[in-house]
């Protein structure tokens, strides 16, 4: 397939592009700055996803079979709600513009990056959620803006017959993990008590699931792209510190993180368990790293500290 990849210079793209190429697909990489496009064999398309008319102009005369929307504006681990506002916009306006672009180029397949936290930040109890569970209702709080954007992204894409990939938290050879390792070495990565229960996905597995969904995903479907085990964030932070060759992190009460409410929710306040059975069954996919212990074993204490 000829695939337009929005977010071609991002973290997931570094794993996704080689897999798309190996599977025989041609990749057109969308970026605002072609100098950032460091993956080989990708034809750049220079456009800002937030500029709908500019995007259509940049794609004038281009044809493609599929569009994959992996554009986010996260750049660093979000600690405050406002750190996610630009990504929220990319999930509403950016998605709308990319769907128009898909129509222009004749693409019949559309995949979008979604997030398991669309089910809601907070305590989901001991139940294991499948894709049948609804995304969270708005509550009038600071998470509403992110929830509205996640819902809009999925509604737009799935409503047009596209596919939503509800990724877990990315980890592996990627910036957030390297940053956590660097913080652990400086003893600046504490473990909150109580700690959250979350779902992770190694970026190599996020990429392999994306290729599988491009080739075999059902129209209008959503897939949980998470590894096999929910993780206690205290255990995970300890394991990241160990992978970095750092001492055991300090323990702090969860309320210490109240000054950074988004981070508090990620590390202390949320408890969620998810099934990846549907992705295994319908996409013929399985994570190469079923849990973070296997995934972190691929990192060494000499990892970059960016
Ligand atoms: N599920 C998760 O846990 C999750 C999801 C996403 C990211 N993250 C994490 O967040 C950190 C940063 O991620 P990242 O490297 O992917 O960086 P990022 O800064 O979020 O950029 C992602 C991509 O989006 C593109 N993009 C952003 N705004 C755009 C726009 N208006 N028009 C066109 N393209 C646009 C960027 O392209 P250009 O700048 O080249 O235009 C870039 O290729 C990483 O540690 C990553 O793991 C985690």
Image: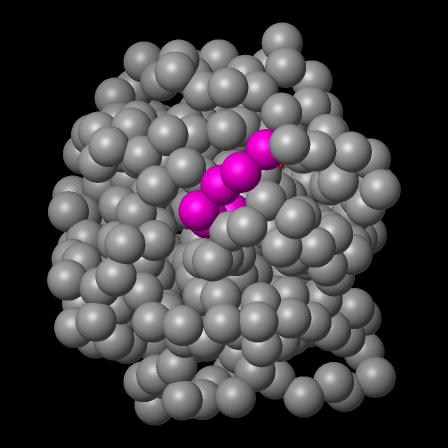
Vertical arrangement, residue 229 with respect to residue 186, above or below: below
Left or right of 221? Residue 85 is right
Left or right of 106? Residue 259 is right
Work out whether residue 258 can be spotted: no
Q: Which residue reaches farthest front?
A: 61
Task: Residue 262 in the image: state x and y as whole percent.
Answer: 69, 59
Foreground: 130 or 95?
95
Task: Residue 87 in the image: state x and y as whole percent.
Answer: 71, 50
Quadrant location, the N terminus: top left
Left or right of 260? Residue 132 is left
Q: Quadrant of residue 71?
A: top right
75 in the magenta segment: no
Region rendered in magenta: 62-67
Residue shown at 64%/71% (left/top)?
156
- Marks counted in the figure total 0
Q: Quadrant of residue 299?
A: top left
Foreground: 113 or 167?
113
Residue shown at 62%/55% (left/top)?
103
Residue shown at 15%/47% (left/top)?
288
Q: In which quarter of the image is residue 76?
A: top right
Residue shown at 19%/53% (left/top)?
287
Task: Residue 112 in the image: state x and y as whole percent.
Answer: 52, 57
Left or right of 2? Residue 83 is right
63 in the magenta segment: yes
Work out whether residue 92 can be spotted: yes
Q: Is the magenta stretch mostly helix, strand or loop?
A: loop
Task: Residue 170 in the image: state x and y as whole percent.
Answer: 42, 46
Quadrant location, the C terminus: top right
The colour scheme used here is: one colour
């Amino acid at each position: 397939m000829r695939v337009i990849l929005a977010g071609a210079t991002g973290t997931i793209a570094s794993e996704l592009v080689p897999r798309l190429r190996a599977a025989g697909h041609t990749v057109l990489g969308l970026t605002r700055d072609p100098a950032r496009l460091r993956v080989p064999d990708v034809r750049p398309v220079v456009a800002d996803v937030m500029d709908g008319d500019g995007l259509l102009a940049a794609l004038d005369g281009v044809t493609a079979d599929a569009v994959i929307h992996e554009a986010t504006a996260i750049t660093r681990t979000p600690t405050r709600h406002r750190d996610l506002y630009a990504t929220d916009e990319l999930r509403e306006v950016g998605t709308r513009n990319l769907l128009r672009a898909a129509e222009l180029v004749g693409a019949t397949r559309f995949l979008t990056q979604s997030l398991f936290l669309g089910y809601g930040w907070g305590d989901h109890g001991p139940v294991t959620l499948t894709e049948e569970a609804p995304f969270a209702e708005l509550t009038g709080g600071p998470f509403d803006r992110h929830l509205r954007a996640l819902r809009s992204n999925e509604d737009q894409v799935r409503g047009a017959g596209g596919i939503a990939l509800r990724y877990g938290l990315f980890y592996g050879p990627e910036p957030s993990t390297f940053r956590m390792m660097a913080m652990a070495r400086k003893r600046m990565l504490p473990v909150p008590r109580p700690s959250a229960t979350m779902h992770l996905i190694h970026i190599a597995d996020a990429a392999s699931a994306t290729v599988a969904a491009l080739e075999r995903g059902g129209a209008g479907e959503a897939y949980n792209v998470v590894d096999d085990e929910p993780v206690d964030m205290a255990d995970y932070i300890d394991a990241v510190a160990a992978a970095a060759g750092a001492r055991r992190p300090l323990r702090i009460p969860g309320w210490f993180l109240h000054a950074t409410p988004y981070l508090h929710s990620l590390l202390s306040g949320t408890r969620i368990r998810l099934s990846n059975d549907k992705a295994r069954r319908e996409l013929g996919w399985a994570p190469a790293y079923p849990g973070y212990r296997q995934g972190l074993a691929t990192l060494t204490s000499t990892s970059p500290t960016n």
